[in-house]
Image (cartoon, rainbow, N blue to C red):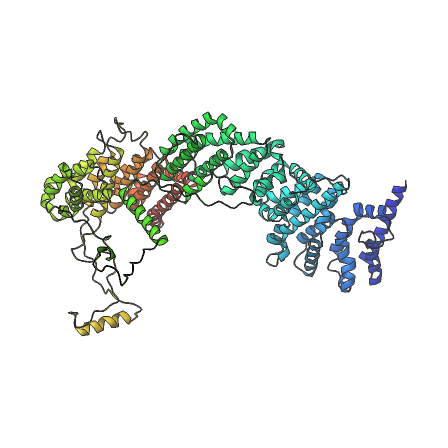
C-alpha cells in the first residue's frame, strides 16, 4: 500500500512539472519545474527526495522527461535560460540520471532531429556524456546487478548503440562530425571505460561483494564482431597483461569476462586479443584455460587460426602454440594441433590446391610445434613425424613450383635433425633466401614473452657449381683482407745485407692468367669433331663458345651439319663444369634453328615425343623452339646498324677537326637539339620494311608439338606425372601463337591450341593452369576478332564462366591475374566485333 502511495505521489508531481513545461508562459515557473525534476536525480547534491522516490522516477518517468526536453529543444524559453541555468538544469537532466536511458534517448534524438541549433545542443550533450565517465557508470551499474530489468530487445538496442555509436553519428552528422565520435577516438575511450568497470569489479570482489560481467562481455563481443577489436585491444591488452601479472583477482576477472562472451562473438574477441598481446605468457594469464572449457575457443585457437587462416604473422603462431605448450593440461591440445598440421602438410591434394602463402603458414606451424615438443613427446610421436616427413617431402619435391620444393627441403632438414639429433640428417642443396632462413630460425624458440626475434642462423650454403665456388672463395678472401690488412714491406735497415733476396718485395701475380696452348677452332666441322670425340676440357669449352658465331657466319656449312650438330648439343652434358654451360648450349642450338630452320625444327619437334630422353632434354627442346621463333619474328638488323628501339642520339658532339661532318651541319644539329616545336614532321626515316621470317614456318614449329601428346611413353607421361613439361609445353605453344600474330595461319593455330588446352583447364598443378591461361591470353591477342567470335560462338558463354570462376576462386594468385586479363581481352575483342554489327543493323 505504501509503495502504491509513493508511486502515485511521484506520478502526480512529475505530471505537474510536465504541464508547467508544456503550457506555462512564465519562465520562472518552468525553471521551478526543471529544478523539481532535478531533485529526483542522484547528482551528488543534497536532495529532499528519498532514494525510493528517485528509484521510482528513474524506473518510470526518466525517459519520458528526456523525450519531453528534446521535444521542446527549439522552444524560446530554453534559449532564454542563462548558460549556468542550462548547464545545471537542462544538461544535468541528461548527465545525472540512469546512463543507459540517457544514451538511448540521446541517440534516438540524434536520429530524429534535422540539422539545427537543437541538434548542435544535443551533440554537445552527447560529447559531455562520453567525456564525463557516464559509460563507465553504465557498465558498472550492470556489473553491480543494479541495472534495469530490461527486456532482450532493450539490451540489444543498448549494445547496438554502444558498439556502433561511431558509425551512427558519422551517418547522421556528416560532414560535420565531431572528433570524439571518430573510431580512433571513441573505441579507445570505450576501452578505458570498460577497464574502469573491471577495476571496480575487482575492488568489489575484494570487499566480498558479488558482481556480474555478462553485460561487459557482451559489449566486448559486440564491438569486436563489428571490426573494431584492434582499436579496443590496443588499449585493453597492455593493461590486462600488466594487471594480471601479479594479481590473482584480476586473472579471475579476465577469465570470467572471456567465459561470458557469447559464442557467436568469441572468435573475433580471441583473434583481436591474440593479435594484441605481446607473448604466450600474457595470453595465458588473460584467458586461462578457456581453450579447455569452451569448444568454440578450442576450435578457434587449435584449428581455425592455424589451418584455415594464413594471413597472420609468424608471431601469432608463436603466441598460440606457446600458449598451448605452457600448461600441462593444455599440452595434449598441442599434440592434437601437431597431428592436424602434419596431416595438412603431407597431404598431396593440399600441396596442389592451396595457395603458396597458406603452405608456408602451415610449414611454420609444423616447425614451431616440433620445436616445442619435449624429448619424451618426440619419441612417442616419432612414427607419425616420420610418416609426415616421407609423404610430405614427396608431395613438395614433386611440385613444379620452386618455392614449394624449397619449403619441402627446409622442413625435411629441420624434422630429420630434430628427430635424430646424433644420427644421419637430410641435407639438400638450395639457394638460401629470407624465406628459408626464417623457416630455419623457427627451430630456435624465443625465451620470454618480451624476447625479440633472434638473429637468423647463418646456414651452411652448399656450393654446387664452379662459378659459385669461385664467388665464395673471393668473398672469403675479401673478408680476410678486410680483417687482416696486408703487412707493409719491411723497412731495410742500414746495416742489413743489401744483396739478400729476402728483402725484395714479391711481385703481385694474382691477376695473371694461365696461357693455354689450345686455340679456338676456326671451322664448324672442327667444332663438331671436338664436341663428339675430344676429352680435353679446354678444347671442348673453346669449341662450345665458338659454335654460335661460326654457325651464323658459315651458312652453307651449317646447312650440311645442322641436324647432326643439334643432336650432339642436345645430348651434351656438363661433365667439365663449364661456366655458363646451359646458356652457351642453348645459344648454339638457337643459332642452328635460325640459320637452317626447317631441318632443325623438324628434328626437335619430332624428337620431343621420342623415347629415351630426359625431362631436361625435352625442356631444352621447348626452350630452343621458343627462342628461335622469337628471333625469327623480329626484324632483321643490318650488320653494324643500330638495333630497333635503341636510342641513337648522343649528347656529346665530337671536335670539328676530328669529325668529317662540316661545321655548318654541327651547328645545325645543335640548334635542332635546343629548339622546341609544337608540331614537327617526320625527322627520322621510317623503319625499313623487312619480311617476317617466322610467319612462313610457324606451322612447322606449332603443329608437330600437338601430335602424340596423349600417348604415354615408357619414360614420359605428359598427361600423367610430368606436370612441369606439360606446363612448359602449353606455355611454349601459347608463345608460338602469339609470335604468329597477323600471319594467315594464326587463326588455325589459335583454334587448335584452344581445343588442346580446353581438356586440361582444370588441371591440379598450378603450373599447368598458368600455362593454359597464358595460352588463352595469347589466342585472344593473336586471333582476329571476327575469327574469334566465329570459332568460339558456341563455347563463348562457357569460356567466360570458366574464366570468371578462375579469377574468383583459383588458389594461385598468378592464375587469378591471368584470368582477369583474359576476361578483359575477350570483352575487348567482342566489343570490337559487335559494335560495327550493331551500327550496321541500326543503319
The one nearer the camera, 358 or 413, is 413
Which of the 4 quarters of the picture holds residue 266? Answer: top right
Quadrant assignment, res 405:
top left
The foreground one among 836 and 819 is 819
At horizontal 42% and vertical 33% (from top left) the residue drawn is 417
Residue 594 vs 352, above or below: the answer is below
User: x and y percent of residue 711 in the render?
Assistant: 26, 28
Asked where in the image residue 141 lies, by quadrant, the reply is top right
Side of 603 where 827 appears, left or right = right
* Residue 544 visible in the shown view: yes
- Residue most extreme to the front: 495
Image spot of residue 184 (x, y percent): 59, 53
| Quadrant including the N terminus | top right
Can residue 20 be seen from the camera position used here? no
Query: How far across and how far down the image is residue 111, in percent?
Result: 66, 52
Could you tell whether 394 is left or right of 632 in the image? right
Of 235 and 266, nearer the camera is 235
Q: Quick check: 826 left or right of 655?
A: right
Q: How many tags in the picture? A: 0
Which residue is at the front of the view, 365 or 744?
Answer: 365
Spot occupied by residue 185 in the image (x, y as percentages of width and height): 62, 54
Amino acid at each position: 500500500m505504501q509503495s502504491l502511495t509513493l508511486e502515485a505521489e511521484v506520478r502526480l508531481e512529475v505530471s505537474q512539472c510536465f504541464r508547467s513545461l508544456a503550457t506555462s508562459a512564465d519562465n520562472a515557473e518552468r525553471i521551478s519545474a526543471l529544478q523539481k525534476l532535478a531533485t529526483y536525480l542522484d547528482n551528488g547534491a543534497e536532495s529532499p527526495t528519498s532514494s525510493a522516490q528517485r528509484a521510482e522516477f528513474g524506473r518510470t518517468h526518466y525517459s519520458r522527461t528526456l523525450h519531453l526536453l528534446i521535444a521542446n529543444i527549439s522552444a524560446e524559453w530554453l534559449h532564454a535560460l542563462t548558460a549556468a541555468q542550462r548547464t545545471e538544469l537542462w544538461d544535468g537532466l541528461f548527465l545525472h540520471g540512469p546512463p543507459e536511458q540517457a544514451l538511448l534517448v540521446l541517440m534516438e534524438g540524434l536520429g530524429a532531429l534535422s540539422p539545427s541549433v537543437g541538434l548542435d545542443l544535443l551533440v554537445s550533450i552527447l560529447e559531455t556524456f562520453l567525456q564525463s565517465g557516464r559509460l563507465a557508470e553504465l557498465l558498472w551499474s550492470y556489473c553491480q546487478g543494479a541495472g534495469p530489468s530490461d527486456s532482450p530487445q532493450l539490451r540489444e538496442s543498448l549494445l547496438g548503440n554502444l558498439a556502433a555509436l561511431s558509425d551512427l553519428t558519422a551517418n547522421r552528422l556528416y560532414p560535420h562530425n565531431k572528433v570524439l565520435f571518430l573510431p580512433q577516438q571513441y573505441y579507445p575511450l570505450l576501452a578505458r571505460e570498460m577497464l574502469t568497470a573491471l577495476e571496480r569489479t575487482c575492488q568489489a570482489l575484494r570487499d566480498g561483494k558479488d558482481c556480474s560481467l555478462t553485460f561487459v562481455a557482451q559489449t566486448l563481443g559486440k564491438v569486436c564482431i563489428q571490426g573494431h577489436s584492434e582499436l579496443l585491444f590496443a588499449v585493453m591488452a597492455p593493461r590486462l597483461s600488466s594487471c594480471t601479472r601479479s594479481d590473482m583477482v584480476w586473472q579471475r576477472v579476465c577469465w570470467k569476462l572471456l567465459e561470458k562472451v557469447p559464442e557467436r562473438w568469441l572468435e573475433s574477441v580471441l583473434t583481436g586479443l591474440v593479435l594484441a598481446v605481446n607473448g604466450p605468457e600474457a595470453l595465458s594469464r588473460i584467458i586461462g584455460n578457456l581453450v579447455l572449457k569452451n569448444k568454440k575457443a578450442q576450435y578457434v585457437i587449435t584449428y581455425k587460426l592455424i589451418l584455415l587462416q594464413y594471413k597472420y604473422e609468424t608471431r601469432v603462431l608463436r603466441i598460440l602454440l606457446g600458449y598451448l605448450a605452457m600448461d600441462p593440461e593444455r599440452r595434449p591440445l598441442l599434440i592434437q594441433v601437431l597431428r592436424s598440421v602434419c596431416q595438412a602438410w603431407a597431404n598431396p591434394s593440399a600441396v596442389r590446391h592451396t595457395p603458396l602463402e597458406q603452405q608456408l603458414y602451415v610449414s611454420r606451424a609444423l616447425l614451431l610445434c616440433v620445436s616445442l615438443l619435449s624429448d619424451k613427446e618426440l619419441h612417442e610421436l616419432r612414427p607419425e613425424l616420420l610418416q609426415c616427413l616421407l609423404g610430405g617431402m614427396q608431395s613438395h619435391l614433386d611440385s613444379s613450383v620452386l618455392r614449394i620444393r624449397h619449403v619441402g627441403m627446409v622442413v625435411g632438414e629441420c624434422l630429420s635433425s630434430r628427430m635424430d639429433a646424433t644420427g644421419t640428417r637430410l641435407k639438400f642443396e638450395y639457394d638460401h633466401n629470407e624465406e628459408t632462413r626464417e623457416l630455419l630460425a623457427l627451430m630456435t624458440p624465443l625465451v620470454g614473452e618480451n624476447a625479440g626475434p633472434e638473429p637468423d642462423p647463418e646456414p651452411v650454403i652448399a656450393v654446387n657449381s664452379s662459378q659459385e665456388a669461385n664467388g665464395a672463395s673471393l668473398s672469403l678472401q675479401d673478408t680476410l683482407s678486410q680483417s687482416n690488412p696486408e703487412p707493409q714491406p719491411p723497412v731495410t735497415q742500414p746495416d742489413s745485407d743489401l744483396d739478400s733476396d729476402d728483402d725484395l718485395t714479391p711481385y703481385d701475380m694474382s691477376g695473371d692468367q694461365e696461357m693455354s696452348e689450345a686455340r679456338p677452332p676456326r671451322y664448324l666441322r672442327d667444332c663438331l669433331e671436338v664436341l663428339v670425340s675430344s676429352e680435353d676440357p679446354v678444347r671442348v669449352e673453346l669449341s662450345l663458345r665458338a659454335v654460335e658465331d661460326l654457325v651464323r657466319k658459315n651458312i652453307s656449312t651449317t646447312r650440311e651439319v645442322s641436324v647432326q650438330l643439334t643432336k650432339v648439343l642436345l645430348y651434351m652434358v656438363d661433365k667439365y663444369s663449364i661456366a655458363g654451360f646451359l646458356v652457351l648450349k642453348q645459344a648454339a642450338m638457337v643459332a642452328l634453328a635460325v640459320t637452317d630452320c626447317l631441318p632443325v625444327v623438324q628434328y626437335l619437334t619430332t624428337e620431343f615425343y621420342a623415347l629415351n630422353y630426359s625431362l631436361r632434354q625435352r625442356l631444352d627442346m621447348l626452350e630452343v623452339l621458343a627462342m628461335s621463333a622469337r628471333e625469327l619474328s623480329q626484324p632483321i638488323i643490318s650488320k653494324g646498324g643500330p638495333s630497333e628501339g635503341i636510342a641513337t642520339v648522343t649528347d656529346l658532339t665530337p671536335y670539328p677537326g676530328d669529325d668529317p661532318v662540316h661545321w655548318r651541319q654541327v651547328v645545325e644539329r645543335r640548334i635542332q637539339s635546343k629548339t622546341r616545336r609544337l608540331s614537327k614532321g617526320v625527322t627520322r626515316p621510317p623503319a625499313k620494311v623487312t619480311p617476317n621470317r617466322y610467319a612462313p614456318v610457324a606451322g612447322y614449329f606449332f603443329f608437330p608439338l600437338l601430335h602424340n601428346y596423349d600417348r604415354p611413353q615408357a619414360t614420359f607421361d605428359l598427361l600423367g606425372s610430368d606436370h612441369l613439361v606439360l606446363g612448359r609445353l602449353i606455355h611454349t605453344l601459347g608463345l608460338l601463337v602469339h609470335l604468329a600474330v597477323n600471319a594467315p595461319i594464326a587463326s588455325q593455330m589459335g583454334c587448335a591450341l584452344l581445343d588442346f588446352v580446353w581438356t586440361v583447364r582444370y588441371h591440379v598443378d598450378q603450373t599447368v593452369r598458368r600455362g593454359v591461361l597464358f595460352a588463352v591470353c595469347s589466342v585472344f591477342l593473336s586471333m582476329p576478332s571476327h575469327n574469334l567470335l566465329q570459332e568460339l560462338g558456341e563455347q563463348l558463354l562457357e569460356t567466360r564462366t570458366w574464366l570468371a570462376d578462375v579469377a574468383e576462386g583459383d588458389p594461385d594468385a598468378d592464375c587469378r591475374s591471368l584470368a582477369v586479363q583474359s576476361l578483359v581481352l575477350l570483352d575487348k575483342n567482342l566489343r570490337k566485333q559487335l559494335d560495327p554489327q550493331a551500327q550496321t543493323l541500326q543503319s
